[in-house]
Image (tube, rainbow, N blue to C red):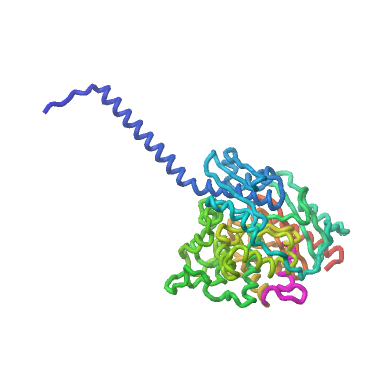
């Protein structure tokens, strides 16, 4: 056998070429792997941008550049890629499109009857427009008395005015407070309110997770009507086999965030909860496929997923379509309690996003607070079942959470995202709806008081300390003025 003699330089060249090829392959593999790993969080960031700008531009009537600068850019890790984010607002088509580095494209479209919808399939573009055809002809008459006149309510209480003004005063150092609206209701009447420039008494503002308290109310109404039982297994078709461990999950477990489902929420973009809100066309369909991580009822774990499942249960109980939900909510809740400027948003299957996506005026949010302050009653009419408010504000395990509301309970348990439990300078009987970036509807039964605070506050404590100070200052001002 003959061996071909190869010059050493040729061997070296081939070796270097092989190394270069191996290095290139490694770089490409790393690039593809990184792209695969980062796909979900970047799509979530893009979807969050499209949806927020769409909702606050077309529902709230705010400036999209301001929304991006205040609401989106400082949010989580979005600032790290903000120089790569490009969004376009098409006012004629009423849609917002976002890309990151020219990729990760998302689109949100606006319809008058369903707010903004994240488009997951091309045909979704028409859903928002079609929803208008199914809207109720006339909203029901309100059962609630007026809590103020048409203009901004003025106060003669200087201490109260100072308390409200302090909550609008920006600190010397960042992060910004950016309070957008405050409404103080004492004994059923607005005694003080203030709004940021460009916002008025009728401006719908995003409540984020304060929306969960609306879902609590809708479930309560269905319980009063005898259509649901919180102690029974959740009526979700995929769980009806008694051999399925999820069959044991009750409505109470979902309301109290003790379902045990693997729907972890970190708001990092990598988590399942972020995926179901921003990447799934059928949010509840995704959530109902989650496996169990713990026995239902034994461990508290906060997640939007539980309230998306409750939202699907509401949808199915009232007719099975988005317009049915809207009609039901308007007829049984929003209309009777006096909420006039409300937009509840939906996914493409007609399931409302009852976890974190309803917009309403600050006065509307105050009407929700009054419903719970008055034990679920509006005048002589019962909206929520007897005992529902007590149930909703009762403690879940060793937490500061009730069932759709946070309670003013000090506990050794760990709150989500490292938030503190409760408000230490506010009466213990207080409970509150809480939303991301500082949305609060605080109910203080012992003071016959409701305080609404809405804003864009990127605070690590969820702005709980700020709300605590506001409510405490309001109570002190009213007491010193002789109003008890």
- Looking at the image, residue 5 lies above or below residue 223: above
Residue 17, by quadrant, is top left
Front residue of this view, candidates 458 and 34: 34
What is the x, y in percent for residue 481? 86, 63
Confirm whether residue 461 shows in the render: no
Residue 49: image location, x then y, percent: 60, 47
Foreground of the two, 423 or 321: 321
Q: Quadrant of the N terminus?
A: top left
Residue drawn at x 82%, y 54% as measured from the top left: 162
Q: Viewer-proximal residue, 362 or 395?
A: 362
**Residue lying farthest left?**
1
Taking 180 as reference, is 321 above or below it?
A: below
Residue 430 % position (x, y): 71, 67
- Can see residue 33? yes
Relative to residue 154, is residue 466 drawn left or right?
Answer: left
Quadrant where the image shows the C terminus: bottom right
Give residue 319's quadrant in the image.
bottom right
Q: Between 412 and 340, which is closer to the camera in this rendering?
A: 340
Is residue 380 part of the magenta span, yes or no? Answer: yes
Residue 289: x %, y % from top left:
47, 62
**Residue at the image point whose x is 55% and y is 65% from the top:** 309
Snapshot quadrant of residue 23: top left
Write the start and end of the magenta stretch as one range: 365-385
Q: How many numbered marks, from 0 up?
A: 0
Check if residue 421 falls in the magenta segment.
Answer: no
């Amino acid at each position: 056998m003959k061996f071909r003699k190869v010059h050493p330089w040729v061997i070296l060249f081939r070796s270097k070429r092989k190394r270069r090829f191996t290095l290139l392959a490694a770089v490409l593999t790393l690039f593809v792997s990184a792209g695969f790993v980062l796909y979900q969080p970047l799509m979530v960031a893009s979807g969050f941008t499209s949806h927020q700008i769409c909702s606050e531009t077309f529902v709230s009537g705010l400036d999209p550049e301001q929304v991006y600068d205040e609401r989106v850019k400082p949010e989580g890790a979005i600032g790290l890629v903000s120089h790569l984010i490009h969004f376009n607002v098409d006012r004629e088509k009423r849609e917002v499109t976002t890309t990151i580095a020219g990729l990760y494209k998302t689109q949100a479209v606006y319809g008058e009857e369903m707010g903004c919808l994240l488009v997951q399939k091309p045909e979704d573009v028409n859903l928002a427009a079609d929803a208008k055809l199914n809207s109720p002809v006339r909203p029901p008459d309100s059962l609630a008395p007026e809590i103020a006149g048409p203009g901004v309510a003025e106060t003669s209480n200087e201490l109260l005015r100072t308390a409200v003004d302090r909550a609008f005063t920006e600190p010397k150092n960042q992060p910004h407070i950016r309070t957008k609206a405050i409404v103080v209701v004492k004994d059923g009447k607005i005694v003080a309110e203030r709004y940021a420039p460009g916002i008025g008494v009728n401006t719908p503002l995003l409540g984020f997770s304060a929306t969960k308290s609306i879902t609590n109310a809708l479930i309560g109404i269905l319980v009063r009507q005898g259509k649901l039982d919180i102690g029974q297994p959740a009526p979700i078709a995929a769980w009806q086999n008694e051999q399925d461990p999820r069959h044991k999950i009750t409505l109470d477990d979902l309301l109290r965030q003790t379902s045990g489902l693997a729907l972890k929420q970190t708001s990092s973009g990598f988590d399942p909860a972020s995926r179901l809100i921003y990447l799934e066309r059928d949010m509840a369909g995704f959530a109902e496929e989650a496996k169990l991580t713990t026995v239902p009822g034994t461990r508290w774990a906060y997640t939007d997923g539980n309230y998306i499942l409750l939202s699907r249960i509401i949808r199915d109980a009232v007719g099975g379509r988005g317009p049915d939900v809207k009609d039901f909510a308007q007829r049984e809740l929003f209309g009777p309690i006096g909420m006039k400027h409300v937009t509840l948003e939906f996914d493409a299957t007609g399931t409302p996003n009852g976890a974190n996506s309803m917009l309403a005026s600050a006065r509307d949010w105050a009407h929700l607070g009054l419903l719970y302050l008055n034990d679920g009653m509006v005048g002589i009419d019962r909206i929520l079942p007897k005992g529902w408010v007590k149930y909703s504000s009762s403690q879940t395990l060793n937490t500061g959470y009730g069932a759709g509301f946070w309670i003013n309970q000090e506990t050794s348990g760990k709150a989500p995202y490292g938030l503190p439990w409760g408000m230490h300078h506010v009466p213990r009987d207080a409970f509150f709806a809480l939303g991301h970036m500082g949305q609060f509807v605080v109910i203080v039964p012992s003071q016959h008081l409701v305080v609404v605070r809405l804003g864009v506050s990127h605070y690590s404590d969820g702005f709980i300390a700020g709300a605590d100070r506001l409510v405490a200052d309001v109570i002190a001002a009213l007491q010193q003025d002789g109003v008890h």
